[in-house]
Amino acid sequence: MPHPTPQQRSWPIFSSLPRAVWRYDLAAGLTLAAIAIPEQMATARLAGFPPQIGFFAFLAGSLAFAAFGSNRFLSSGADSTIAPIFAGALALLATRGSPQFMALASFLALLVGGILILGYVLRAGWIADLLSVPVTTGFLAGISIHILISQLPALLGLPSVEGGEFYRVDQMAKHWRDVDPVTVAIGVASLATIVIGEKISPKLPAALVALAGSAFAVRYFDLEARGVAVLGAVSTEFPHPRFPEIAAADIPHIVGLAIIIAVVIMVQTAATSRSFPNEEGRAPDVDRDYLGVGAGCLLAGLVGAFSVDASPPRTAIVTSTGGRSQLSSIFAALVIVALLLFGAALLEHVPNAALAGVLLFIAARIFRLHVMRDIYSKTRGEFALVALTMAAVVALPVQTGVSLSILASLLHGVWTTTRSRLITFARVPGSSVWWPCSTDAAEPCGERLEGVLVAAFQAPLSFLNAYGFQRDLREAIEAEAEKPALVVLEASNIVEIDYTAARILNDAILDCRAAGADFAIARLESVRAHQALARYGVMRTLGEGRLFRSVDEATRALAPGAAALQIDAPAPLVPRKSRAFKPPSASA
Protein backbone atom coordinates (compact mmCIF):
# COMPACT_ATOMS: atom_id res chain seq x y z
CA MET A 1 0.00 0.00 0.00
CA PRO A 2 1.56 3.35 -0.96
CA HIS A 3 2.42 5.86 1.73
CA PRO A 4 0.15 8.90 1.93
CA THR A 5 1.62 12.15 0.77
CA PRO A 6 2.16 15.02 3.25
CA GLN A 7 -0.96 16.72 1.87
CA GLN A 8 -3.04 13.55 2.34
CA ARG A 9 -2.06 12.99 5.94
CA SER A 10 -4.36 14.08 8.73
CA TRP A 11 -3.60 17.02 10.98
CA PRO A 12 -3.56 15.59 14.53
CA ILE A 13 -1.18 16.92 17.13
CA PHE A 14 1.63 14.70 18.42
CA SER A 15 1.54 12.79 15.12
CA SER A 16 5.07 11.43 15.65
CA LEU A 17 4.35 9.71 18.96
CA PRO A 18 1.98 6.73 18.39
CA ARG A 19 4.73 4.43 17.11
CA ALA A 20 7.27 5.49 19.71
CA VAL A 21 9.32 2.95 21.61
CA TRP A 22 9.87 4.82 24.85
CA ARG A 23 12.91 2.84 26.01
CA TYR A 24 14.95 4.03 23.03
CA ASP A 25 13.55 7.55 23.32
CA LEU A 26 14.45 7.72 27.01
CA ALA A 27 18.11 6.93 26.33
CA ALA A 28 18.21 9.38 23.43
CA GLY A 29 16.44 12.04 25.50
CA LEU A 30 18.96 11.80 28.35
CA THR A 31 21.83 12.19 25.88
CA LEU A 32 20.05 15.08 24.18
CA ALA A 33 19.56 16.83 27.54
CA ALA A 34 23.26 16.44 28.35
CA ILE A 35 24.13 18.10 25.05
CA ALA A 36 21.38 20.74 25.19
CA ILE A 37 21.96 22.02 28.75
CA PRO A 38 25.34 23.68 28.10
CA GLU A 39 24.40 24.64 24.54
CA GLN A 40 21.14 26.38 25.54
CA MET A 41 22.87 28.25 28.36
CA ALA A 42 25.65 29.39 26.03
CA THR A 43 23.22 30.44 23.30
CA ALA A 44 21.16 32.44 25.78
CA ARG A 45 24.32 34.22 26.83
CA LEU A 46 25.18 34.87 23.18
CA ALA A 47 21.73 36.40 22.66
CA GLY A 48 22.09 38.64 25.71
CA PHE A 49 19.71 36.70 27.99
CA PRO A 50 20.08 34.98 31.36
CA PRO A 51 20.82 31.23 31.05
CA GLN A 52 17.37 30.07 32.17
CA ILE A 53 15.81 31.85 29.16
CA GLY A 54 17.72 29.46 26.94
CA PHE A 55 16.10 26.59 28.84
CA PHE A 56 12.65 28.14 28.35
CA ALA A 57 13.35 28.47 24.60
CA PHE A 58 14.29 24.78 24.47
CA LEU A 59 11.15 23.77 26.37
CA ALA A 60 8.95 25.86 24.06
CA GLY A 61 10.62 24.63 20.90
CA SER A 62 10.65 20.96 21.93
CA LEU A 63 7.06 20.74 23.17
CA ALA A 64 5.58 22.74 20.30
CA PHE A 65 7.43 20.78 17.64
CA ALA A 66 6.45 17.47 19.25
CA ALA A 67 2.84 18.63 19.06
CA PHE A 68 2.75 20.11 15.57
CA GLY A 69 5.87 19.02 13.65
CA SER A 70 6.27 16.08 11.32
CA ASN A 71 9.88 14.96 11.64
CA ARG A 72 10.28 12.35 14.38
CA PHE A 73 13.88 13.29 15.21
CA LEU A 74 14.21 17.05 14.77
CA SER A 75 15.32 18.99 17.85
CA SER A 76 14.09 22.58 18.12
CA GLY A 77 15.30 25.19 20.58
CA ALA A 78 17.69 28.11 21.04
CA ASP A 79 20.19 28.12 18.19
CA SER A 80 23.48 29.94 17.76
CA THR A 81 22.90 30.56 14.04
CA ILE A 82 20.10 33.08 14.53
CA ALA A 83 21.06 34.40 17.98
CA PRO A 84 23.78 36.80 16.73
CA ILE A 85 21.44 38.10 14.02
CA PHE A 86 18.58 39.22 16.24
CA ALA A 87 20.82 40.12 19.20
CA GLY A 88 22.94 42.48 17.09
CA ALA A 89 19.90 44.04 15.44
CA LEU A 90 17.93 44.53 18.65
CA ALA A 91 20.98 46.03 20.40
CA LEU A 92 20.49 49.04 18.12
CA LEU A 93 17.03 49.57 19.64
CA ALA A 94 17.62 48.72 23.32
CA THR A 95 20.43 47.95 25.74
CA ARG A 96 21.36 44.28 25.58
CA GLY A 97 19.86 42.40 28.53
CA SER A 98 17.44 45.17 29.49
CA PRO A 99 13.68 44.52 29.94
CA GLN A 100 13.02 46.42 26.71
CA PHE A 101 15.56 44.28 24.85
CA MET A 102 13.94 41.08 26.15
CA ALA A 103 10.45 42.32 25.23
CA LEU A 104 11.62 43.16 21.71
CA ALA A 105 13.13 39.68 21.33
CA SER A 106 9.91 38.05 22.53
CA PHE A 107 7.80 40.14 20.16
CA LEU A 108 10.20 39.25 17.36
CA ALA A 109 9.68 35.56 18.17
CA LEU A 110 5.91 36.02 17.81
CA LEU A 111 6.34 37.65 14.40
CA VAL A 112 8.76 34.95 13.25
CA GLY A 113 6.36 32.26 14.46
CA GLY A 114 3.52 33.87 12.54
CA ILE A 115 5.60 33.99 9.33
CA LEU A 116 6.58 30.33 9.67
CA ILE A 117 2.97 29.28 10.23
CA LEU A 118 1.99 31.34 7.18
CA GLY A 119 4.70 29.43 5.30
CA TYR A 120 2.98 26.20 6.33
CA VAL A 121 -0.41 27.46 5.17
CA LEU A 122 0.99 28.62 1.81
CA ARG A 123 3.12 25.48 1.33
CA ALA A 124 6.24 27.64 1.08
CA GLY A 125 8.85 24.91 1.45
CA TRP A 126 10.47 26.18 -1.76
CA ILE A 127 11.77 29.21 0.16
CA ALA A 128 14.41 26.94 1.68
CA ASP A 129 16.00 26.66 -1.77
CA LEU A 130 16.65 30.40 -2.10
CA LEU A 131 20.11 30.24 -0.51
CA SER A 132 22.82 28.52 -2.54
CA VAL A 133 25.57 26.45 -0.90
CA PRO A 134 28.28 29.13 -1.45
CA VAL A 135 26.07 31.85 0.05
CA THR A 136 25.04 29.63 2.97
CA THR A 137 28.69 28.73 3.59
CA GLY A 138 29.74 32.38 3.61
CA PHE A 139 26.79 33.35 5.79
CA LEU A 140 27.63 30.70 8.41
CA ALA A 141 31.30 31.68 8.32
CA GLY A 142 30.35 35.28 9.03
CA ILE A 143 28.12 34.20 11.90
CA SER A 144 30.95 32.09 13.34
CA ILE A 145 33.23 35.14 13.29
CA HIS A 146 30.55 37.14 15.10
CA ILE A 147 30.39 34.42 17.77
CA LEU A 148 34.19 34.37 18.10
CA ILE A 149 34.48 38.14 18.56
CA SER A 150 31.53 38.29 20.97
CA GLN A 151 33.00 35.56 23.19
CA LEU A 152 36.63 36.63 23.25
CA PRO A 153 36.10 39.05 26.20
CA ALA A 154 34.66 36.23 28.35
CA LEU A 155 37.44 33.89 27.25
CA LEU A 156 40.17 36.44 28.03
CA GLY A 157 38.68 37.84 31.21
CA LEU A 158 38.09 41.29 29.70
CA PRO A 159 35.00 43.46 30.16
CA SER A 160 32.29 43.04 27.50
CA VAL A 161 32.24 45.71 24.81
CA GLU A 162 29.23 46.80 22.73
CA GLY A 163 29.54 48.06 19.20
CA GLY A 164 30.61 46.89 15.77
CA GLU A 165 32.96 43.98 15.26
CA PHE A 166 35.98 46.11 14.31
CA TYR A 167 35.41 48.38 17.31
CA ARG A 168 35.27 45.37 19.64
CA VAL A 169 38.51 43.97 18.26
CA ASP A 170 40.17 47.39 18.61
CA GLN A 171 39.08 47.70 22.26
CA MET A 172 40.30 44.20 23.10
CA ALA A 173 43.66 44.95 21.45
CA LYS A 174 44.02 48.08 23.58
CA HIS A 175 43.43 46.10 26.79
CA TRP A 176 45.49 43.00 26.02
CA ARG A 177 47.60 43.60 29.14
CA ASP A 178 44.49 43.00 31.28
CA VAL A 179 44.01 39.43 30.03
CA ASP A 180 43.50 37.03 32.96
CA PRO A 181 45.61 33.85 32.52
CA VAL A 182 43.37 31.80 34.84
CA THR A 183 40.25 32.70 32.87
CA VAL A 184 42.02 31.87 29.62
CA ALA A 185 43.12 28.51 31.04
CA ILE A 186 39.52 27.66 32.00
CA GLY A 187 38.16 28.60 28.59
CA VAL A 188 40.88 26.76 26.65
CA ALA A 189 40.56 23.67 28.88
CA SER A 190 36.78 23.63 28.35
CA LEU A 191 37.19 23.97 24.59
CA ALA A 192 39.83 21.23 24.52
CA THR A 193 37.57 18.92 26.54
CA ILE A 194 34.73 19.39 24.08
CA VAL A 195 36.98 18.89 21.03
CA ILE A 196 38.54 15.72 22.43
CA GLY A 197 35.15 14.38 23.50
CA GLU A 198 33.76 15.05 20.03
CA LYS A 199 36.69 13.18 18.49
CA ILE A 200 36.08 10.17 20.74
CA SER A 201 32.31 10.10 20.18
CA PRO A 202 29.71 12.77 19.38
CA LYS A 203 27.40 10.97 21.81
CA LEU A 204 29.58 11.91 24.78
CA PRO A 205 28.26 14.91 26.78
CA ALA A 206 31.66 16.57 26.56
CA ALA A 207 30.28 20.10 26.92
CA LEU A 208 28.43 19.14 30.10
CA VAL A 209 31.61 17.54 31.45
CA ALA A 210 33.53 20.72 30.62
CA LEU A 211 31.02 22.92 32.47
CA ALA A 212 30.87 20.61 35.48
CA GLY A 213 34.66 20.35 35.66
CA SER A 214 35.18 24.09 35.38
CA ALA A 215 32.51 24.79 38.02
CA PHE A 216 34.21 22.31 40.35
CA ALA A 217 37.57 24.03 39.77
CA VAL A 218 36.04 27.43 40.55
CA ARG A 219 34.60 26.15 43.85
CA TYR A 220 37.59 24.06 44.90
CA PHE A 221 40.25 26.69 44.16
CA ASP A 222 38.06 29.69 45.08
CA LEU A 223 38.70 31.23 41.67
CA GLU A 224 35.87 33.75 42.04
CA ALA A 225 38.02 35.55 44.58
CA ARG A 226 40.76 35.76 41.93
CA GLY A 227 38.45 37.51 39.49
CA VAL A 228 37.03 34.63 37.46
CA ALA A 229 33.54 35.66 36.33
CA VAL A 230 30.72 33.13 36.84
CA LEU A 231 27.06 32.89 35.92
CA GLY A 232 25.81 33.64 39.42
CA ALA A 233 22.32 32.87 40.70
CA VAL A 234 20.00 31.31 38.14
CA SER A 235 16.32 32.15 38.51
CA THR A 236 14.07 29.13 39.03
CA GLU A 237 10.84 31.05 38.51
CA PHE A 238 8.90 29.74 35.54
CA PRO A 239 7.44 32.47 33.34
CA HIS A 240 3.75 33.24 33.04
CA PRO A 241 2.51 33.47 29.44
CA ARG A 242 1.92 37.06 28.44
CA PHE A 243 2.05 39.23 25.35
CA PRO A 244 5.25 41.35 25.26
CA GLU A 245 4.72 45.09 25.40
CA ILE A 246 6.81 47.21 23.04
CA ALA A 247 6.62 50.71 21.61
CA ALA A 248 4.67 51.03 18.38
CA ALA A 249 7.59 52.95 16.86
CA ASP A 250 9.78 49.83 17.13
CA ILE A 251 7.46 47.56 15.13
CA PRO A 252 8.60 48.71 11.64
CA HIS A 253 12.21 47.99 12.62
CA ILE A 254 11.30 44.47 13.76
CA VAL A 255 9.16 43.37 10.81
CA GLY A 256 12.03 43.32 8.33
CA LEU A 257 14.24 41.53 10.86
CA ALA A 258 11.49 38.95 11.43
CA ILE A 259 11.39 38.14 7.71
CA ILE A 260 15.17 37.66 7.63
CA ILE A 261 15.13 35.42 10.71
CA ALA A 262 12.20 33.42 9.31
CA VAL A 263 14.02 32.77 6.01
CA VAL A 264 17.14 31.59 7.84
CA ILE A 265 15.02 29.30 10.04
CA MET A 266 13.21 27.94 6.97
CA VAL A 267 16.52 27.10 5.31
CA GLN A 268 17.94 25.37 8.39
CA THR A 269 14.69 23.56 9.20
CA ALA A 270 14.38 22.24 5.64
CA ALA A 271 18.03 21.14 5.63
CA THR A 272 17.58 19.32 8.95
CA SER A 273 14.31 17.68 7.92
CA ARG A 274 15.77 16.49 4.62
CA SER A 275 18.96 15.20 6.26
CA PHE A 276 17.06 13.11 8.82
CA PRO A 277 13.89 11.83 7.10
CA ASN A 278 11.31 9.76 8.98
CA GLU A 279 11.59 6.94 6.47
CA GLU A 280 13.97 6.20 3.62
CA GLY A 281 12.43 6.90 0.26
CA ARG A 282 9.73 9.14 1.67
CA ALA A 283 9.83 12.88 1.09
CA PRO A 284 9.90 14.91 4.31
CA ASP A 285 6.96 17.17 5.09
CA VAL A 286 8.98 20.39 5.29
CA ASP A 287 5.88 22.58 5.36
CA ARG A 288 4.53 20.75 8.42
CA ASP A 289 7.93 21.17 10.10
CA TYR A 290 7.61 24.93 9.52
CA LEU A 291 4.38 24.71 11.50
CA GLY A 292 6.17 22.92 14.36
CA VAL A 293 9.05 25.40 14.56
CA GLY A 294 6.67 28.33 14.10
CA ALA A 295 4.52 27.12 17.00
CA GLY A 296 7.71 26.87 19.05
CA CYS A 297 8.56 30.51 18.26
CA LEU A 298 5.05 31.60 19.28
CA LEU A 299 5.24 29.73 22.57
CA ALA A 300 8.76 31.04 23.23
CA GLY A 301 7.61 34.61 22.61
CA LEU A 302 4.70 34.21 25.03
CA VAL A 303 6.95 32.92 27.84
CA GLY A 304 9.50 35.71 27.47
CA ALA A 305 12.10 33.80 25.43
CA PHE A 306 13.37 34.33 21.89
CA SER A 307 13.02 32.67 18.48
CA VAL A 308 13.84 28.97 18.20
CA ASP A 309 15.27 27.02 15.29
CA ALA A 310 15.90 23.45 14.17
CA SER A 311 19.31 22.15 15.20
CA PRO A 312 21.14 19.74 12.86
CA PRO A 313 23.74 18.66 15.50
CA ARG A 314 21.15 17.93 18.20
CA THR A 315 18.95 16.12 15.69
CA ALA A 316 21.96 14.00 14.72
CA ILE A 317 22.42 13.11 18.40
CA VAL A 318 18.81 11.87 18.61
CA THR A 319 19.20 9.62 15.58
CA SER A 320 22.66 8.32 16.52
CA THR A 321 21.51 7.36 20.04
CA GLY A 322 18.52 5.39 18.80
CA GLY A 323 15.69 7.88 19.26
CA ARG A 324 12.46 6.83 17.56
CA SER A 325 10.15 9.82 18.02
CA GLN A 326 9.66 13.26 19.52
CA LEU A 327 9.45 11.58 22.93
CA SER A 328 13.25 12.02 22.93
CA SER A 329 12.81 15.81 22.96
CA ILE A 330 10.04 15.56 25.57
CA PHE A 331 12.27 13.49 27.88
CA ALA A 332 15.10 16.02 27.40
CA ALA A 333 12.68 18.83 28.26
CA LEU A 334 11.66 17.00 31.45
CA VAL A 335 15.31 16.69 32.46
CA ILE A 336 15.76 20.44 32.04
CA VAL A 337 12.61 21.13 34.06
CA ALA A 338 14.04 18.93 36.85
CA LEU A 339 17.34 20.84 36.67
CA LEU A 340 15.54 24.16 37.06
CA LEU A 341 13.45 22.90 39.97
CA PHE A 342 16.07 21.01 41.94
CA GLY A 343 19.54 21.73 40.58
CA ALA A 344 19.72 25.40 39.63
CA ALA A 345 22.25 25.98 42.40
CA LEU A 346 24.69 23.74 40.53
CA LEU A 347 24.85 26.32 37.75
CA GLU A 348 25.83 29.31 39.87
CA HIS A 349 29.57 28.61 39.75
CA VAL A 350 29.82 27.83 36.02
CA PRO A 351 32.46 30.26 34.70
CA ASN A 352 31.61 32.46 31.76
CA ALA A 353 34.85 31.37 30.12
CA ALA A 354 33.59 27.77 29.99
CA LEU A 355 30.41 28.90 28.24
CA ALA A 356 32.60 30.88 25.84
CA GLY A 357 34.48 27.65 25.13
CA VAL A 358 31.18 25.95 24.25
CA LEU A 359 30.28 28.75 21.83
CA LEU A 360 33.72 28.76 20.26
CA PHE A 361 33.32 25.06 19.54
CA ILE A 362 29.94 25.77 17.92
CA ALA A 363 31.53 28.60 15.90
CA ALA A 364 34.26 26.28 14.66
CA ARG A 365 31.67 23.67 13.71
CA ILE A 366 29.64 26.06 11.53
CA PHE A 367 32.78 27.52 9.90
CA ARG A 368 32.75 25.00 7.05
CA LEU A 369 36.37 25.21 5.97
CA HIS A 370 36.23 21.89 4.10
CA VAL A 371 33.30 23.18 2.00
CA MET A 372 35.20 26.40 1.27
CA ARG A 373 38.19 24.39 0.07
CA ASP A 374 35.99 22.27 -2.17
CA ILE A 375 34.28 25.34 -3.69
CA TYR A 376 37.65 27.06 -4.20
CA SER A 377 39.09 24.02 -5.98
CA LYS A 378 36.15 23.78 -8.39
CA THR A 379 34.94 27.33 -9.05
CA ARG A 380 36.76 30.53 -8.17
CA GLY A 381 33.73 32.61 -9.13
CA GLU A 382 31.44 30.98 -6.57
CA PHE A 383 34.23 31.07 -3.98
CA ALA A 384 34.22 34.84 -4.45
CA LEU A 385 30.54 34.68 -3.52
CA VAL A 386 31.53 32.85 -0.30
CA ALA A 387 34.10 35.53 0.55
CA LEU A 388 31.80 38.45 -0.26
CA THR A 389 28.95 37.00 1.79
CA MET A 390 31.23 36.36 4.77
CA ALA A 391 32.66 39.89 4.55
CA ALA A 392 29.19 41.46 4.36
CA VAL A 393 27.95 39.57 7.44
CA VAL A 394 31.06 40.55 9.43
CA ALA A 395 31.61 44.14 8.31
CA LEU A 396 28.00 45.35 8.18
CA PRO A 397 25.25 45.25 10.80
CA VAL A 398 24.26 41.61 11.03
CA GLN A 399 20.73 42.01 9.67
CA THR A 400 22.08 44.05 6.75
CA GLY A 401 24.74 41.46 6.01
CA VAL A 402 22.20 38.63 6.10
CA SER A 403 19.84 40.58 3.84
CA LEU A 404 22.64 41.10 1.34
CA SER A 405 23.49 37.38 1.58
CA ILE A 406 19.94 36.44 0.60
CA LEU A 407 20.00 39.04 -2.20
CA ALA A 408 23.37 37.73 -3.42
CA SER A 409 22.00 34.20 -3.57
CA LEU A 410 18.99 35.34 -5.61
CA LEU A 411 21.15 37.42 -7.96
CA HIS A 412 23.47 34.47 -8.42
CA GLY A 413 20.50 32.32 -9.41
CA VAL A 414 19.25 34.98 -11.81
CA TRP A 415 22.71 35.39 -13.32
CA THR A 416 23.02 31.62 -13.83
CA THR A 417 19.64 31.51 -15.55
CA THR A 418 20.46 34.43 -17.85
CA ARG A 419 23.68 32.68 -18.98
CA SER A 420 21.71 29.87 -20.65
CA ARG A 421 22.44 29.83 -24.38
CA LEU A 422 20.97 28.17 -27.43
CA ILE A 423 22.93 25.16 -28.73
CA THR A 424 22.69 23.26 -32.03
CA PHE A 425 22.26 19.51 -32.49
CA ALA A 426 23.56 17.09 -35.10
CA ARG A 427 22.65 13.47 -35.75
CA VAL A 428 25.00 10.74 -34.53
CA PRO A 429 26.11 8.92 -37.70
CA GLY A 430 24.24 5.70 -38.37
CA SER A 431 21.57 6.32 -35.72
CA SER A 432 18.40 8.25 -34.99
CA VAL A 433 20.01 10.05 -32.03
CA TRP A 434 20.51 13.82 -32.18
CA TRP A 435 23.23 15.17 -29.92
CA PRO A 436 24.65 18.62 -29.07
CA CYS A 437 27.51 19.71 -31.29
CA SER A 438 30.82 19.75 -29.43
CA THR A 439 32.59 23.04 -28.82
CA ASP A 440 35.86 21.25 -29.56
CA ALA A 441 36.73 22.01 -33.17
CA ALA A 442 38.79 18.82 -33.40
CA GLU A 443 35.76 16.66 -32.62
CA PRO A 444 33.34 16.02 -35.50
CA CYS A 445 29.92 17.59 -35.05
CA GLY A 446 27.96 14.74 -36.61
CA GLU A 447 25.58 14.56 -39.54
CA ARG A 448 23.62 17.64 -40.56
CA LEU A 449 20.52 17.28 -42.72
CA GLU A 450 20.39 19.71 -45.60
CA GLY A 451 17.93 22.51 -44.93
CA VAL A 452 17.37 21.50 -41.27
CA LEU A 453 18.41 23.40 -38.12
CA VAL A 454 17.96 21.58 -34.81
CA ALA A 455 18.49 23.77 -31.76
CA ALA A 456 17.91 23.37 -28.04
CA PHE A 457 17.61 25.65 -25.05
CA GLN A 458 18.77 23.92 -21.87
CA ALA A 459 16.92 25.87 -19.23
CA PRO A 460 13.38 27.01 -18.35
CA LEU A 461 12.26 29.84 -20.63
CA SER A 462 11.37 32.98 -18.72
CA PHE A 463 11.61 36.74 -18.96
CA LEU A 464 15.19 36.39 -17.67
CA ASN A 465 16.51 34.60 -20.73
CA ALA A 466 13.80 34.73 -23.41
CA TYR A 467 15.33 37.67 -25.28
CA GLY A 468 18.69 35.88 -25.30
CA PHE A 469 16.93 32.81 -26.71
CA GLN A 470 15.40 34.93 -29.48
CA ARG A 471 18.76 36.54 -30.31
CA ASP A 472 20.62 33.21 -30.33
CA LEU A 473 17.99 31.59 -32.58
CA ARG A 474 18.28 34.40 -35.14
CA GLU A 475 22.08 34.16 -35.07
CA ALA A 476 21.94 30.36 -35.48
CA ILE A 477 19.69 30.70 -38.52
CA GLU A 478 21.90 33.40 -40.05
CA ALA A 479 25.01 31.28 -39.43
CA GLU A 480 23.68 28.46 -41.62
CA ALA A 481 25.33 28.24 -45.04
CA GLU A 482 21.91 27.83 -46.64
CA LYS A 483 18.68 29.25 -45.33
CA PRO A 484 17.01 26.39 -43.37
CA ALA A 485 13.65 25.11 -44.54
CA LEU A 486 12.92 23.54 -41.15
CA VAL A 487 13.77 24.64 -37.59
CA VAL A 488 13.27 22.06 -34.85
CA LEU A 489 13.37 23.17 -31.20
CA GLU A 490 14.51 20.31 -28.94
CA ALA A 491 12.65 21.22 -25.72
CA SER A 492 13.44 18.42 -23.27
CA ASN A 493 15.02 20.88 -20.81
CA ILE A 494 12.39 23.59 -21.10
CA VAL A 495 10.41 22.65 -18.01
CA GLU A 496 8.68 26.01 -17.53
CA ILE A 497 7.56 28.85 -19.82
CA ASP A 498 6.23 32.17 -18.56
CA TYR A 499 4.12 34.76 -20.36
CA THR A 500 7.04 36.82 -21.68
CA ALA A 501 8.85 33.74 -22.99
CA ALA A 502 5.66 32.42 -24.62
CA ARG A 503 5.19 35.68 -26.53
CA ILE A 504 8.80 35.59 -27.72
CA LEU A 505 8.52 31.93 -28.74
CA ASN A 506 5.34 32.78 -30.62
CA ASP A 507 7.17 35.59 -32.44
CA ALA A 508 10.06 33.23 -33.25
CA ILE A 509 7.67 30.78 -34.90
CA LEU A 510 6.10 33.57 -36.97
CA ASP A 511 9.54 34.94 -37.95
CA CYS A 512 10.61 31.51 -39.19
CA ARG A 513 7.42 31.11 -41.18
CA ALA A 514 7.86 34.58 -42.70
CA ALA A 515 11.38 33.62 -43.75
CA GLY A 516 10.06 30.47 -45.46
CA ALA A 517 11.07 27.97 -42.76
CA ASP A 518 8.76 25.52 -41.07
CA PHE A 519 8.93 25.25 -37.25
CA ALA A 520 8.45 22.21 -35.01
CA ILE A 521 8.95 21.37 -31.34
CA ALA A 522 10.34 17.99 -30.22
CA ARG A 523 10.50 16.33 -26.79
CA LEU A 524 8.40 18.84 -24.89
CA GLU A 525 8.25 16.53 -21.88
CA SER A 526 7.23 19.02 -19.20
CA VAL A 527 3.50 19.02 -18.45
CA ARG A 528 3.72 22.58 -17.08
CA ALA A 529 5.48 23.84 -20.22
CA HIS A 530 2.94 22.11 -22.46
CA GLN A 531 0.05 23.64 -20.51
CA ALA A 532 1.71 27.07 -20.74
CA LEU A 533 2.01 26.85 -24.53
CA ALA A 534 -1.65 25.87 -24.77
CA ARG A 535 -2.73 28.60 -22.32
CA TYR A 536 -0.76 31.38 -24.02
CA GLY A 537 -1.86 30.40 -27.55
CA VAL A 538 1.53 29.23 -28.83
CA MET A 539 0.05 25.84 -29.76
CA ARG A 540 -2.38 27.56 -32.15
CA THR A 541 0.50 29.37 -33.82
CA LEU A 542 2.56 26.18 -34.01
CA GLY A 543 -0.30 24.37 -35.74
CA GLU A 544 -1.35 20.76 -36.13
CA GLY A 545 1.30 18.09 -36.60
CA ARG A 546 4.18 20.23 -35.36
CA LEU A 547 4.72 18.64 -31.90
CA PHE A 548 6.82 15.45 -31.88
CA ARG A 549 8.15 12.85 -29.47
CA SER A 550 11.67 13.07 -30.84
CA VAL A 551 13.84 15.10 -33.19
CA ASP A 552 14.06 12.09 -35.49
CA GLU A 553 10.25 12.00 -35.83
CA ALA A 554 10.18 15.70 -36.65
CA THR A 555 12.85 15.46 -39.35
CA ARG A 556 11.29 12.35 -40.90
CA ALA A 557 7.96 14.11 -41.12
CA LEU A 558 8.93 17.66 -42.10
CA ALA A 559 12.50 17.79 -43.45
CA PRO A 560 13.05 18.60 -47.12
CA GLY A 561 12.82 15.34 -48.99
CA ALA A 562 10.97 13.83 -46.03
CA ALA A 563 9.22 11.36 -48.30
CA ALA A 564 12.54 9.59 -48.80
CA LEU A 565 13.08 9.49 -45.04
CA GLN A 566 9.64 8.07 -44.20
CA ILE A 567 10.57 4.62 -42.96
CA ASP A 568 7.95 3.47 -40.48
CA ALA A 569 7.56 7.08 -39.38
CA PRO A 570 5.26 7.31 -36.35
CA ALA A 571 2.43 9.78 -36.24
CA PRO A 572 3.18 13.25 -34.85
CA LEU A 573 2.23 13.94 -31.28
CA VAL A 574 -1.28 15.37 -31.11
CA PRO A 575 -1.79 17.72 -28.13
CA ARG A 576 -4.68 17.00 -25.83
CA LYS A 577 -6.85 19.55 -24.10
CA SER A 578 -6.79 17.74 -20.79
CA ARG A 579 -4.60 19.17 -18.04
CA ALA A 580 -3.41 15.67 -17.30
CA PHE A 581 -1.62 15.51 -20.69
CA LYS A 582 1.60 13.48 -20.35
CA PRO A 583 3.63 13.27 -23.56
CA PRO A 584 5.56 10.01 -23.76
CA SER A 585 9.29 10.26 -23.20
CA ALA A 586 11.70 8.90 -25.78
CA SER A 587 15.29 9.37 -26.85
CA ALA A 588 15.88 12.14 -29.34
Image (tube, rainbow, N blue to C red):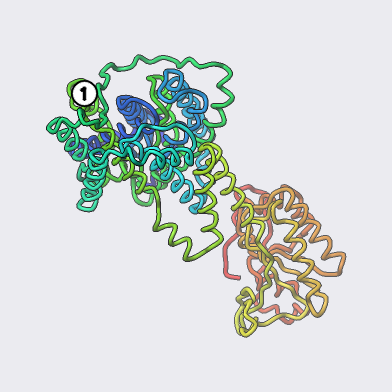
Q: With 496 as the anchor, is 70 left or right in this view?
A: left
Q: With 271 as the anchor, is 178 left or right in this view?
A: left
Find residue 159 and report its horizontal and vertical position in percent: 36, 32
Quarter of the rendering occupied by the C terminus: bottom right
Residue found at the very far front of the displayed protein: 177
Please give the residue where the numbered disc 1 appears in the rendered image: 344
Q: Residue at x 30, y 41 (%)?
A: 314
Find residue 385 and report its horizontal and vertical position in percent: 54, 54
Find residue 192 and report its horizontal and vertical position in percent: 24, 48
In this view, 335 is above or below 2:
above
**Element under disc 1:** helix
Q: Residue at x 59, y 24 (%)?
A: 252
In this view, 474 is above or below 413:
below
Q: With 482 as the anchor, is 550 left or right in this view?
A: left
Q: Amino acid at mark 1?
A: Ala
Find residue 84 and report its horizontal and vertical position in percent: 43, 36
